[in-house]
Image (cartoon, rainbow, N blue to C red):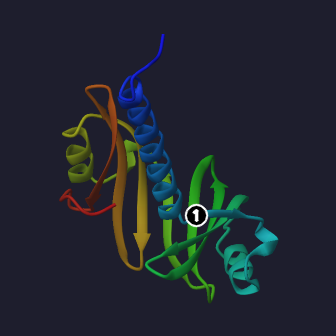
Amino acid sequence: MARSCGEGYVPLMRTHLLASTVAVLASASLAAASDTPIAFKQLPASVQAAAMAHLEGGTIKGASKEVEKGQTFYEVETLRNGHTRDLLFDAAGQLVEVEEAVTLEAVPLPVRKALEAQGAVLSVESVTRGATVSYEGVVRKNGKRTEVAVAADGTPSKP
């Protein structure tokens, strides 16, 4: 049985369009991802020295190179007192940010209330940037996990 020109063409076209769309989205997400895992010994010497100075009894679990808005940073993942603690350094070895896992009970009451208002709190990190401390929590509501960022006074902030 001979097929006419149009038979089977639309489903095939949809398949190709879907495959193309998936490929473009995958490429875009890879381009947006700027974290590259690297070995600690591959970090600039200034970053290695700074990380060792800020280790405070912790152990190094990993490292990565990050590019944010054209600026290069290095993150050193550590484990201290049974909690994760990530140190973010600029290329010169200056400590830019510390993210540390904390218990919900350890955060200020306004932060706890703000996070609990968003759903069941699964985890919390304190984020110290300079003299400013904020908090990021992962909450679950209606089966969905969401990251919520709040300032120390409980007001919403950017993650």
Q: Quadrant of the C terminus?
A: bottom left
- From the viewer's perspective, is 17 left or right of 74? left
Is residue 99 depicted above or below 89 in this figure?
above
| Front-most of residues 20 and 101 | 20
Q: Among all residues in the image, which is located at the extreme top?
A: 1
Give the residue at mark 1: 35
| Front-most of residues 15 and 42 | 15
Residue 141 lies in quadrant? top left
Q: Secondary structure at mark 1?
A: loop
- Name the residue at 73% across, 81% down: 49
Residue 140: x %, y % from top left: 32, 33
Residue 22: x %, y % from top left: 46, 43
- Name the residue at 71% across, 86% down: 46
Is residue 4 depicted above or below 36 in this figure?
above
Q: Among all residues in the image, which is located at the extreme right?
A: 41
Residue 26 seen in the figure: yes
Residue 94: x %, y % from top left: 57, 85
- Name the residue at 41% across, 41% down: 17
